[in-house]
Amino acid sequence: MNKLWRNLIGIPLMTMCLASVLGVSSVASDYYASITNTTNGSNLSSSLHTLITNTHTTKLSYANVWTAYKTTDTFPGTPIIWDTYSEYLYTYGKDQTGSSGYTGEGDNYNREHTVPQSWFGKASPMVADVFHILATDGQVNGKRSNYPYGEVDTSTYTSGNGGKLGSSKLSGYKGTVFEPIDEYKGDIARGYMYMAIRYSDQLSSWTVGEAQKIFTGSYPYLTSYAMDLFTKWSHLDPVSDKEIIRNDAIEDVQGNRNPFIDHPEWIDTIWTNSYKDSDSNTKYSTQNVISAINTLTQSSSSEDVYRAYAKYCRLNTKDKSSVTNVSTLFSLVESKANSTIDLDTYWHEIIARNTIDSLDQTKVDHVISLINALPEVVTLSIEEDILNIESSYSALTASEKTKVTNYSILQEKRAELNTLMKDINTFRETPTKASMKFNYDVTETASNDTVTYTLVSNTNELKVGDVIVIAASDANYALSTTQNTNNRGQAEITKESNTITFGDDVQFITLERGALENTFALKTSSGYLYAASSSSNVLKTQDEIDDNASWAMDYSNGTGTIKAQGTNSRNNLKYNSSAKIFSCYASGQQAVQIYKKTSGKGTTIDISNVYIRFGGGISKSTYQGLLTLGEDVSFGVSLSKDGINYTDYLANPVYVDSIGAKVENVNGNYVQYSVLIPTNEVDYTTLVYAKCYVKIDGLKYYMQISKYSMHTLAQYYIQNKATLGISDEVALALGEF
């Protein structure tokens, strides 16, 4: 008898708790008349999907995108393309990519699908939806390729305006990413949010490349990585005049609008986040623009005039109003571009629309009084007050914000609080971890000369670890090891009463726990069986257990169904006597029988002393920093079965050499603590929510939440056993959960 103890180190499950902005342009207000529920994210996303889909009345051809750029992607009143990837000045139409392509940066501009068209198979209308197709430098477009957007750690390429290609520094994705410059991050983020909602009913089919790293087929339609990245970018680079102009122009071309440009506050309803707005990021200052205009004369080249105008266009609304010599610039642009637009009137209307608000002095005075009421000495208890004031300030209009004369005091207090809470914020960003701990006994029975495969009468006779043969109910054939292009062939068997005999080509299948509740994975000599297609339901094998490689068995009286799960197919494994194959069918064909190995060498696994552990680990410096923040500092874990009502459990932090270490070391550079929850078979599928906390003088701060059951933890270990170094025997024991 083999008796082993396993203490398996858990993997963190991170969530986000994340907040933000204002504003709809007056031009667009009637467009959203049908949107009545703006407080529930799921309902809001559904209503917006209906609106922007129904109003997407003109589906452009891919060639029409070039034409659309004349109004959507040029500096207003000029033929100059607004390129987000370079500083080059391209002329609309003349400099677009032709058959000769490009030899370097600055050659021409191209159509950049910010959502790569390969992800959705170049299908319409996505392939020509201008909301996510930007006019960009052809060379940089090619370098970006089909890589996701992200934040770069080490760059392998930098574009002319500072865009970077390189390895991702964010934990949610570790591949190659492209990072645009700050002033266009919000533009791209809001474009992705538009795509997620506009095509929410199609996202599950976007499976090429890295699409599923960004989009998901169910609400909220963005993965955790994408949601965190794009909500962050949308706040760090709020809506600019450029986007408002482009939104209006695309509505003229396509019929619909991007709601997250008109209503950026809806981002915080649909995708939860904790980011705060900053000023719109632009490369140039007001003084830089004024200086550029002062160098211009009537004899200045078109390029010099356009470069100065480009700088002006890229200022935010507030800064544009401070450019005192702008009339000189407009006059020169109009003469160089032969513009039919009165730029002075044009920009006046844009700026007015972007700052339309009434001045409510009562609101302003309220914020001023709240700031004045802040204590002179900043302590941890001030955080809630500062958050409330920041929320009230964010709700002010642009004009009202300028009237908050003591705003600098709030900024100073926030900076002091951030310094004080440095270690708390590190703690908050740390994920709560989960692991499992259990004993198991492995008993191997003696080998017999005769191996018998006996007909299974009922589903409850099957368990993880059983070896089975799948046979046709009304024919002397079983699933074979032979595989044609699409399906498994047949192997001859002989049925005798409730047993079978067979030749060498019968496929033996070991039952493992499926990725879904109450399912099995069918492990063959070549991998796990799965239904490979929703159209033809072909039967193939793969290396890992996932939803598609999980099978639900409903079996009684010797026959029944083995039903494919997941997104690819929900049909039943059956025998086709005409084609002489086993495959998946919605109806017709022969049902199957299961014969289980009932003698010969066998294995029995008994599980005991089962615990699930929740805890956290932090660096020694963070831990010691937390201890200095109060007189009474304690640590623990809050647990819940419904994610709402939590119970606190105190824990004793210990020093260790590394996070996950099992041995205490008083000289270690890390600190960890946890609580153990005893479980039994009834509780194996019960989800437990957990969040580690530190309590400082009565104020409690939490790590990121985690939720696991014994079953979901076991499935994670099984599916990643190679990476985690888990043996087949341990994986078999994990299959009992």
Image (tube, rainbow, N blue to C red):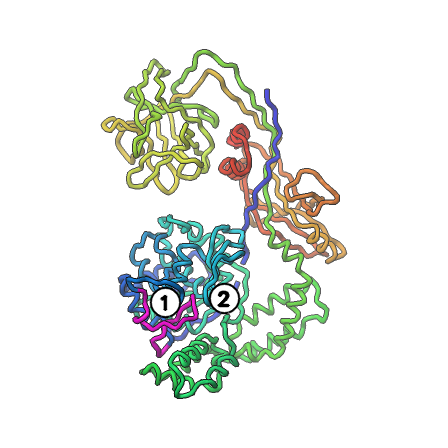
Circle 1 — which element?
Answer: loop
- Image coords of residue 142 (percent x, y): 39, 59
- Image coords of residue 72 (percent x, y): 35, 70
| Left or right of residue 549: residue 173 | right
Q: Which residue is mark 1?
A: 107
- Image coords of residue 46 (percent x, y): 39, 57
Q: Residues within 10 Å of mark 1 (few under 14, many from 20)?
A: some
Q: Which residues are magenta?
A: 76-97
Residue extending furthest toward the left: 578
Question: Which tag is nearer the camera, tag 2 or tag 1?
Answer: 1
Amino acid type for the residue under numbered disc 1: Asp
Q: Is residue 89 magenta?
A: yes
Residue extending furthest toward the right: 631
Q: Which residue is mark 2?
A: 182
Residue extending furthest toward the front: 103
| Left or right of residue 588: residue 636 | right
Q: Quadrant of the N terminus?
A: top right
Amino acid type for the residue under numbered disc 2: Asp
